Image: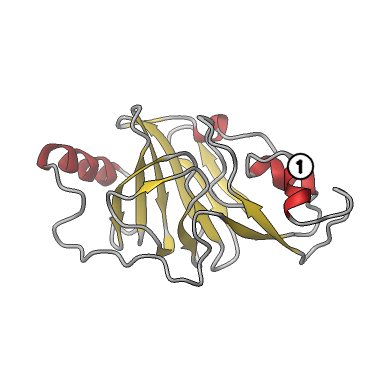
Amino acid sequence: MRIVWGVVALIGVAGCETLPEERPVSRPPQAIPALHGSYHQVRRGETLWRIAHSYGLDVRRLAEANRLPSPTQVAAGQRLFIPLPPESRQFLWPVRGALKGASPSHGVDIAASTGTLVRASRRGRVAVATRRLSGWGPTVVLDHLDGYFTVYAGLERLLVAPGTELRQGAPIGSVGSRALHFEIRYGGTPKNTLALLPRE
């Protein structure tokens, strides 16, 4: 991901919000939820508490948003509406899925169903939104304006454009056939991404 930080550095020096060779990224289609929330399909073995925790939500709020009579009444295949969480300085999981790999210096890889929405781990501004980045495919880099950056690589679709200000939890893209590669960095230095995410 060294090229990502070359791109970010180029943006800082040139004052440009996008890559010269890239065409502007289209805005989200109307079919994608706006900034009010997104959806989650319950997987086998998941509990409402676990789902709420991974999205940074109180389990009671999630139950109320879906009019569930009891927090224990969820079933595999059920579709839940996920309201945007209250703003937090904590990093949240960008997508729900199976952890395929994690490295203190290379982020985490998360496998999820094709088309699953990927969300902003924290509030920030889109520094990079490109369809081509060193073999990673469509990639988004968010600048959290406090020295921290998050990288979302291997997306199928981009739903944001450079310069867009995003709330925590807002959709930025969707998962394709490959696992989402997610990194948290401070400046150009990789952090232990897994250690900065909520424990499930």
Q: How are the residues colored?
A: secondary structure
Q: Residue at x 12, y 37 (%)?
A: 13
Side of 126 where 21 appears, left or right: left
Residue 37 relative to residue 124: left or right: right
Q: Quadrant of the rendered structure where residue 183 is?
A: top left
**x and y percent of residue 124 in the render?**
39, 40
Q: Few, some or many C-alpha atoms within 10 Å of disc 1 (few <14, some 14-19, many ≥20)?
A: some
Q: Residue furthest left?
A: 14
The residue under the point 67% across, 41% down is 57
In front of the other: 31 or 187: 31
For residue 96, above or below residue 21 = above
Give how far across and how far down residue 77 sits, in percent: 76, 67
18 shown above or below 57: below
Number of callouts = 1
Percent x, y of residue 32: 50, 67
- Circle 1 residue: 59
Q: Is residue 72 above or below residue 88?
A: below
Q: Nearer the viewer, residue 29 or 141?
A: 29
Q: Secondary structure at mark 1?
A: helix
Quadrant in which the N terminus is drawn: top left
Whether residue 2 is situated above or below residue 44 in the rendered picture? above
Image quarter hosting the C terminus:
top right
In this image, 148 relative to 22: left or right? Answer: right
User: Residue placed at 41% from the left, 46% from the top?
Assistant: 166
The quarter holding residue 132 reads bottom left
Q: Amino acid at mark 1?
A: Val
Q: Residue at x 47, y 39 (%)?
A: 122
Residue 37, by quadrant, is bottom right
| Camera-nearest residue between 137 and 34 | 34
In the image, taking residue 37 as reference, residue 159 lies left or right, namely left
